[in-house]
Amino acid sequence: MQKIEFTIEKELQHQGICDASGAIALGDNHFIVANDESNLLRIYAADHSGSAIATVDIHSYFDNNPSAKEVDLEAAAQIGDMIYWITSHGRNKKGKFKPERHQFFANKRQSSESWQFEQIGRSYTQLVLGDMLNDSRLDRYRLKDAEQLPPKSVGGLNIEGLSVTPSGELLIGFRSPIVEGKALLVPLNNPRELLEGAQAILGNPIELDLGGLGIRSVEYWEAQKQYIIVAGAVDGGDRFALYQWSGLDELPQQIEGTRFPSDFRPEAVLFYPQRPNYFQLLSDDGSLVRVDDLPCKDIEDEEHCQKFFRSLWARAHNVVQQ
């Protein structure tokens, strides 16, 4: 695996939300992004600062959420023309069970000329509470106990990563729990069938040494034939790191040497089809960025024009290891 270094070439601001989470590139010039504070997806220009050019309302996707509460969207991955989305599957910060946060669903763009999206099948709600808790291979991670804790407490349950694999399956990345210092990935082999109500077929769990951090984002970079992982502290602290990983038997390698803005906290990585040496990092700016002395996420909705999250465009350089 060739070591990657990269340089930051451009910083952008995208108005309307602060808490960017899962995102997917739409062609080479746009991306669609979730906000873990609402059930709207937003579409932005990839190369320019500015407001969303379209929104996608997904409130109707969830049969177990008649009150339209926030579902805590965290990650996305694309297979063919279908975009899969996953929520945290965790409790709220007070440890209260929230069934609406147990969602795995998919949609797709109706045409290349339209910003309209349609849901595929129905949202699946038993990925953790049913399938993972009943899989003996996952017993050592004590997910039943983890699910009963606030997600950012030690040992709590919090899903924040989702990635396609080269074979067309998915990897589910956990920010928490961390077991013996290792982060957890769980393969999902039949994502399409879940949308029709089938039970999940899970693969053998994968443990990754990310320096004691959990997974905030994991994305497969087709042009480089490897994954980029954003690792972050379980408790929501400021510590983070970027890793590259072949997906094989090699250990993840930390990507070092790049200076970020001091309050930039990567939450998603985007790769664009015709830009093989570039990627875009999105920041969760809800807590650290302040506007008029308020955390960005605390700005009232009627002042949404002041809300924003940032992205960084990065150019990668392959370094031949000696």
Image: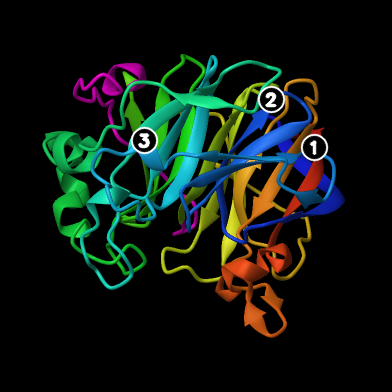
Q: Amino acid at mark 3?
A: Tyr
Tag 3 near tag 1, CB within 8 Å: no
Look at mark 2 in the image and give the residue it sits on.
224
Residue furthest front as drawn:
302
Q: Between 234 and 302, which is closer to the camera in this rendering?
A: 302
The residue carrying pointer 2 sits among few (fewer than 14), some (14 to 19) or many (20 or more) residues within 10 Å by Cα, namely some
Image side of residue 110 versus residue 47, left or right: left
Look at mark 1 in the image and give the residue it sits on.
316
Tag 2 near tag 3, CB within 8 Å: no
Q: Amino acid at mark 2?
A: Gln
Tag 2 near tag 1, CB within 8 Å: yes
The residue carrying pointer 1 sits among few (fewer than 14), some (14 to 19) or many (20 or more) residues within 10 Å by Cα, namely some
Q: Between disc 3 and disc 1, whose residue precedes?
A: 3
Q: Nearer the viewer, mark 2 or mark 3?
A: 3
Image side of residue 162 versus residue 304, left or right: left
Q: Between disc 2 and disc 1, whose residue precedes?
A: 2
Q: Relative to 163, does residue 283 appear above or below in the rendering?
A: below
Mark 3 and mark 1: span between their CA atoms? 37 Å
Q: Between 102 and 65, which is closer to the camera in this rendering?
A: 65
Residue at horizontal 59 percent and vertical 27 percent from the top:
116
Secondary structure category for the residue under label 3: helix
Query: Where are the magenta residues, as a range?
Result: 191-213
Q: Relative to 315, does residue 26 appear above or below in the rendering?
A: above
Q: Position of residue 34 (x, y in %)?
A: 54, 46
